[in-house]
Amino acid sequence: MKDKPVWQQMGLTDEEYRMVQEILGRDPNYLELGMFAVMWSEHCGYKNSRPVLKLFPTEGPQVIQGPGENAGVVDIGDGQAVVFKIESHNHPSAIEPYQGAATGVGGIVRDIFTMGARPIASLNSLRFGPLHDERVKYLFAGVVSGIGGYGNCLGIPTVAGEVYFEESYRGNPLVNAMCVGLVNVDELALAVAGEIGSPLMLVGAKTGRDGIHGATFASEELSEESAEKRPSVQVGDPFMEKLLIEACLQIIQEGLVFGAQDLGAAGLTSSAAEMASKEGRGVEIDVLRVPRREQGMTRYEVMLSESQERMLICPRPGQEERIRQIFAKWGLDATVIGKVTGDGMFRVKEGDKVAGEVPVAALTKMCPVYHRTEEEPAYYRQHREFDPSTLPEPLDYNRVLRDLLASPNIASKEWVFTQYDYQVMTNTVVVPGKGDAAVLRVKGTGKGIALTVDGNGRMVYLDPYRGGMLAVCEAARNLACTGARPLALTNCLNFGNPEKPNIFWQFKNTIQGMAAAARQLDTPVVSGNVSFYNETKGEAVYPTPVVGMVGVLEDIEAHMDMSFKHDGDLIVLLGSYGSELGGSEYLKIEHGLVTGAVPEVNLDEEKMLLQLLQLVIRKGMVNSCHDISEGGMAIALAECAIQGERGFVVNLESIAGRADGVLFSEAPTRVVVSVPRMLLGDVMALAEGHLIDARVLGEVGGDRLVYRVDGKEIINLALDEATSIWGGAIRCAMS
């Protein structure tokens, strides 16, 4: 590594270094080179993804702020808005799981309160290797502990999430953190620089050496040398962040600032450049004024440090002293370190000496953009053409159900979410595990918001286009299962090395599928993050787009969860039967296969189903509602029974004479609801009016899970046994 030219060590290519020389008309000095390296990294510059991201729909009547700010903002009425975003902290979590995950939470929370919004909820999406691996257990435990440790100290509830375990994530876990906040629309703040001559203030924690070149670290593949880059992993202090939240919200609410920007990836360099770039301004920063917690820091280290719990703010004229007073009240620094200029230059000074000087636009708007070659991988057609009907049917369906309930991808995640405080703030109405999405009340109103994160890397690996559609559709369906109207989405796009044609093919096709679904379902993309280079020893993770979505319930009292509630209620399938087994958990658990054609999505039908669910839930016509996803109908019914502590008897019809398809297909656009007998006719009529298939499957009641197919009983399992298997699988693995 040390034999490489310094620009290559920093992550720039030879051609990119020549571009820097041409822009400056000279060789850059060490500081300037470091600034270009972090700003032109994939993590900051989006140089491989920017052209493809333009495919996303980003506008709609509900959208107040789309991509380009710290977070997206959507209107929920009555002068209020929801602010939300999701980001990755994958590489840091692979090296130092506790701090990697903790600082991921801290960073995404800052993106929310920077906008003037009070954070009210956190979510996360996690991917690890097989749970029998000891290092995977170490990473899993550390990440969960880091999320809980930071979020619990902040007093922000962690209300929802997902966890998957697949071989492809063994060396490169995925840790995606989402945060949601509430703001009055007239108090929304943007990350913009003020008038020429306006001061720039650094507020919050002191600057240290942690996190230097974290942005470039996140823009390369993991290797055996990655462990040596622990200094690239930031160290978080949630108590400091809690103070920072209160101080920043106060100065924004008092109207003391033009704008504010989180010091995340690339530290002072990116925050100052991004603020100035939006208005075509320049900035001047004196590194000697930056409060430090370590001795002997160089100007390079100060400008590139990613130390946590820091913000850059641009005060309104004459408000510096009032801002200092507010931050002093919370025990925080608030120091003028520079000013906004009108010459478009980013000037770094050490006292009276100019230490570096580059055009702001060179760091932001002139970042190179690459149009990568794409190539369909050989495996794609092979998997798509696989016929699951050639596989033998199980001899013992009771055993299959037990095995699926014990799969870590399906089993209860109670071991995870009980480490999080999900009731703090007392807004959480549907807690983790009880519904398809979290539901929170909006205090002072009768409304609620529903929140979810969803993604299935296995499906996207097998068919990126359909898999991308499925991710958006499942998120929207999960919100609708609570009674919410989906509003908009944020995404975290986790992929391998985009310079490899097959990886870029996966990426582009995934975005096309996601964009098609988002457009049809009226859920525009308002924020997000791209995480490339998720590879270990040349092997990429499954292409894993994670969709975070928010929805609104006009009446919080009309919310719904998945649990069966009354003996005698009829169980109704809304949507088609489905028999496709491609990509299913059943194929993996029963046959050890990740293969098959991914089920097709009918977006028109999906949209009608969402509308139907919102209607029947709002009218109080169903007593439970649950999406059919991992494990198929068999698992969806079992989960409703386990959560409601009530058994059932269902009578299903086989397709092509096979029971496994109807039981375990993960085909989309399907939910199971429980309906009072007296309301069955009304529900069936509304389903017909929405052009959605509906059929009675059976009845709630008893203490056993009984599945009959074509009149033959093929599964009969005690509810207590199912609950024990499902509830203890992950806990036992981690004990």
Image (cartoon, rainbow, N blue to C red):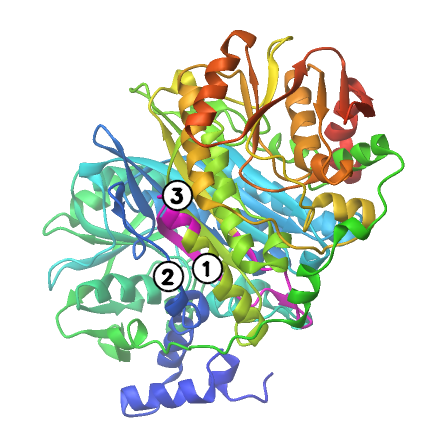
Q: Residues within 10 Å of mark 2 (few under 14, many from 20)?
A: some
* Mark 1 or 2, nearer chain start: 2
Q: Name the residue under label 2.
A: 55
Identified at 37% across, 72% down, the residue is 299
Q: Answer above or below: position of 78 versus 335.
A: above
User: What amino acid is at disc 2?
Assistant: Leu
Place residue 48 in its image quadrant.
bottom left
Place residue 443 in its image quadrant.
top left
Q: Name the residue under label 1.
A: 511
Q: Name the residue under label 3.
A: 521
Task: Judge left or right: residue 299 versus residue 254.
Answer: right
Identified at 46% across, 33% down, the residue is 609
Q: Distance between the residues labelled 1 and 2?
A: 7 Å
Q: Residues within 10 Å of mark 1 (few under 14, many from 20)?
A: many
539 is within the stretch colored magenta: yes
Q: Answer above or below: position of 37 versus 383.
A: below
Res. 457 visible in picture = yes
* Mark 2 or 3, nearer chain start: 2
Task: Judge left or right: residue 36 versus residue 701.
Answer: left
Q: Answer above or below: position of 415 versus 29.
A: above
> x and y percent of residue 200 in the render?
22, 59
> x and y percent of residue 27 in the render?
35, 91
- Mark nearest the camera among 2 and 3 is 3
Q: In which quarter of the image is the C terminus?
A: top right
Q: Which of the two residues, 266 or 74, is positioned nearer the viewer here?
A: 74
Magenta-highlighted residues: 517-545
8 is within the stretch colored magenta: no
Q: Which of the two residues, 660 or 228, is positioned nearer the viewer here?
A: 660
Query: Which secondary structure, mark 1?
Result: helix
> x and y percent of residue 617 in the render?
44, 20
